[in-house]
Image: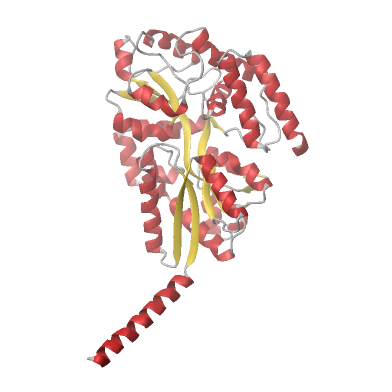
Amino acid sequence: MLKLIKKVAIYSVIAASLLTSANADKTKLTMYYPVSVGGPLTKIVDSMVYDFEKQNPDIDVKAIYAGNYNDARIKSLAALKAGEPAQLAVMFSIDVYDLIEQNAIVSFSDLAKSQEDKKWLKSFYPALMENGTTLGKVWGIPFQRSTIVMYYNKDAFKKAGLDPNKPPKNWDEMVSMGKKLTNDKQWGLMIPSTGYPYWMFGALAKQNGEVLMNGEGTKTYFNNPKVIEALQYWKDLSSKYKIMPEGTIEWGTLRKNFLSGKTAMMWHSTGNLTAVKKNATFDFGVAMLPAKEMRGTPTGGGNFYIFKNTTAKQKEASLKLIKFMTSPENSAKWSIGTGYIGISKAAYETPALKKYVEEFPPAKVARDQLDFATAELSTYQTGRVRKILDDSIQAVLTDKKSAKDALNDAQNQANRLLRDYK
């Protein structure tokens, strides 16, 4: 009996030793990830990581849910400076210039050596690659990507005598329909002006035939006449046409306002689609944003980045993980579960997403709108430039400045910040 106990003990030590050795040989990855839109996003990411580890037992992934986009960037870079860097992260697509300037990331163009990898880099929708491509290289890979879409209450349209299958196609129709939809209990329209006002404004500017910055991140066009006109139109929706509340409208509570019937139309991220679908107690529709001179929306959301201060083995494993999570099948799974855009044409050709779009046509609106999309506002000194524009927009919406004065001031401040980058 004593001999048997000794044998069991010895085998246990050997097994533990082998297990420890196997764990030590694993490539360990830490991935920071933001959760900024409602829904069971973390469960979906967890399931993808589980499937990846199952297929790749030599790689161990620790996914850290860091908060919103800003939190993810701050925590990732803080870990980097503390000598405990993450190997990869999903962060704002517009963070690319700041990350390059801090020498924090590596380009995917440099990591993609094989023909298969190079083909993969070209597999995404071009509009979603704009914010991740600069200086002739790809720095960010699309994952959690969106556009702004218009959600509208079909029941409210019917009650107001409007055709529920004909949402407004242009600015004039949005005003005329908004007037019919506005009453004592309901606004015709709400466009959020906290959180990401520059993003909504990018849509209005594009619809009026302008963009907010150049493709090198070194110049802004805030006080171009068409841009000023776009901000004046945003202001007029409340002060002149009376179809939207005066002042600012909260990003975080807008979905709740729409679901509770306080507004008949709202502009918001397609990332809300699944949550609206699950919680709306009325018939609703999703439409492209209306045009002035053209349709238009900026893309939005998060890209994958790989940090520079990691080993070659970790970079290789990170690339493998990102390729897995952006595969057509996983992109389809992510789109169905969240409402975000499938990031490649191949994702929409998977049986799962093809079936979902056939059964729920609103799921294809954001994808179709990519034909009219532009890059989200992104420059060097992005955070400071973005805040300048956000403050200027809010100053106009709260009657503190005229559109012309606010955007002239914003352009002058942006010029000062960007003059060393030209």
Using the image as rendered, state which of residue 402 and residue 299 is in the foreground.
402
Residue 109 position within the rendered picture, expressed as x and y whole percent measured from the top left: 61, 53
Using the image as rendered, state which of residue 122 and residue 195 is in the foreground.
195
| Colour scheme of the rendered structure | secondary structure
Residue 98 position within the rendered picture, expressed as x and y whole percent measured from the top left: 64, 43
Q: Quadrant of residue 216?
A: top right
Q: Quadrant of residue 284?
A: top left
Q: Quadrant of residue 228?
A: top right
Q: Residue at x 44, y 27 (%)?
A: 268
Count all numbered tags in the image, as a single digit.
Answer: 0
* Screen quadrant of the C terminus: top right
Q: Residue at x 70, y 24 (%)?
A: 411
Q: Is residue 11 above or below residue 104?
A: below
Q: Is residue 370 above or below residue 121?
A: above
Residue 163 position within the rendered picture, expressed as x and y whole percent measured from the top left: 33, 14
Q: Is residue 211 above or below residue 330?
A: above
User: Outermost residue toward the front?
Assistant: 2
Residue 139 position within the rendered picture, expressed as x and y whole percent measured from the top left: 60, 48
Q: Left or right of 101: which side holds 21?
A: left
Q: Residue at x 48, y 32 (%)?
A: 147
| Residue 291 can be seen, yes or no | yes
* Screen quadrant of the N terminus: bottom left
| Residue 136 can be seen, yes or no | no
Using the image as rendered, state which of residue 365 and residue 281 is in the foreground.
281
